[in-house]
Image (cartoon, rainbow, N blue to C red):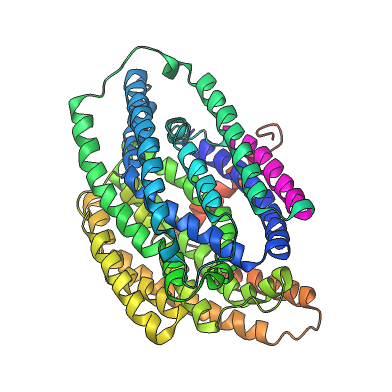
Amino acid sequence: MRIQNSIKNMYVSIITQIVIIILGFLSRMVFINSLGTEYLGVNGLLTSILSMLSLVEGGIGTSIVYNLYKPLAENDTNKVIALVQLYKKLYGILAIVIFILSTVMYVALGRFIKGGTTVPFIGVVYFIFVVKNVISYLNAHKWSLINADQKGYIIAKYNLIFNIITTLTKIVILKLTKNYILYLLIDLGIFMLQNIYNGKIVSDRYEYINTKDNYHVDEDTKKNLVTNVKAIFLHNIGGYCVFGTDNLLISTFININTVGLYSNYTMVISQLASLLTPLLNGMGNSIGNLIATECKEKIYEIFNVMYLINFWIYSFCAISLYNLLEPFIDWCFGRGLLLDKLTLIVILINFYISGLRNSIGTFKQKAGIYDKDKYQPLIESAINLVASIILVKYWGLSGIFMGTTISSILIPLRIQPKIVFKDVFNKPVKAYFKKYVYYIFLTIIAGIVTTNICNLIDIANDFMSLVVKGIVCVSIPNIIYLIIFYRSSEFKYILSIILKIAKVTKPKSVTL
């Protein structure tokens, strides 16, 4: 059942993301043509600011989701209700606090925009972002429940419908009016309807959570929640400082237009990541159940499978992005919107490093290990910010991203694997680092071969050149890895899962 639920989650989410990605690129093309890169920069900057305010959440949701895995597996409805009620209460308070802090933060908004902005009614724009952010907290307890129960695919198909409606409506608004505020209001209005509708679906499916009786979380769980929330709060601060401050630094030290150019890169990469997320999150939710119910040998076996999957996916994606991202931006959004080559390389190194450590991070999170390295993110973020601020003076835009590279290598790469291998697997960590070096070596070799072949392609038509290079990028790395790994136990396990996916994804099994 665990594997079947994961496959359903992956299948529905992948179909959803493919449609959203196609619409997303169409929407971005219309956005740039209608409003320009400065508006893209404002979008990115405001998103980063509100992400910073979301740190107030402190990891409450993550900790409660972790505590939901076991009672859901054991059908302990009383404990599930108690956790959901606590989650709802805390997030209601958080919504109010974040709105107040957002109002205070508005006073300092101008300091984050070097040279100012010509975008009119920036205050109205800001508070539309704020309201949407606050609304996202009101039904968060329901999304956590259905995802912890590995049933996220149930609402994914409705999210697809709402996303299609939202994107098409916004495209029409931009084409007809070129009005940015109306564009944002349409997005906000449909987002509100989506939350109400999906919330009703979860309430109907888990009727027992609708009780008016008050349930209380036991003392042991409370103690675990408090410990984890304190640790996750520090992790969230560190994570934001490392990965969420790029737009703020670019806007502050360079200019808002560069944020817009960078957002084209992040959009392509994030859309690609959103396609990968269903695969990794589907496995991630199952891992929480796995750790709660299986022996350590089985857990370690699945970790090695996920480690190989993470390497294969992110290696292939990094190689493909290096060869295809710039020509794709030229073809899709227009020429003159590229960043320098060094910046691209550093961005992809960070993408690869983050992806390769995804497996160890997932097992650490799903095992509920937050307290042992709670100060690590603060050290990492301090190194990142100091390095970025220093290096931006010498290397410009690429220097900001070099800070992320340096901090990622110095801190989490060394610490996280040691904790997981000791506490979850009871095994020496040497095997992890040995594979890590091996995987990087394979990525470099496959990347050199693929890039050299792509450089031989000389086709005048931009689209056809992109297509041919795309075929090379899809073929070469995957053929190399297939030859190397097809006899491994991890690959055989992956193949068995693929065969199960082929059965589960029949129309009669999952319908949209």
Residue 356 location, quadrant: bottom left
Quadrant (top left/top right/bottom left/bottom right) for the C terminus: top right
Numbered range of the magenta stretch: 154-175
Residue drawn where x is 55% and y is 82% of the image: 340
Residue sitting at x 35%, y 41%:
62
Who is closer to the viewer here, 52 or 6?
Answer: 52
| Residue nearer the viewer, 196 or 65 | 196
Q: Residue 155 colored magenta?
A: yes
**Residue most toward the right?**
461
**Is 85 located above or below residue 131 in the figure?**
above
Tally of marks: 0
**Which is nearer the eye, 229 or 91?**
91
Q: Where is residue 377 drawn, in percent x and y?
A: 27, 60
Relative to residue 121, is residue 166 drawn left or right? right
Between residues 167 and 217, which one lies in front from this camera angle? 167
> Would residue 497 be found to the left or right of residue 401 on screen?
right
As drawn, is 9 to the left or to the right of 95? right
Question: Where in the figure is residue 99, as x and y percent of width and height?
Answer: 41, 41
Expressed as whole percent of the image width and height from the top left, the position of residue 334 reads 72, 73
Can residue 301 be seen at all in this image of the molecule?
no
* Relative height, residue 499 to residue 245 (above, below): above
Residue 474 makes an appearance in the image: yes
Q: Residue at x 71, y 62 (%)?
A: 29
Query: Is residue 124 within the magenta segment?
Result: no
| Residue 369 image point, x, y percent | 26, 47
Dominant secondary structure, magenta: helix
Quadrant of residue 290 within the rendered picture = top left
Is residue 361 depicted above or below 153 in this figure?
below
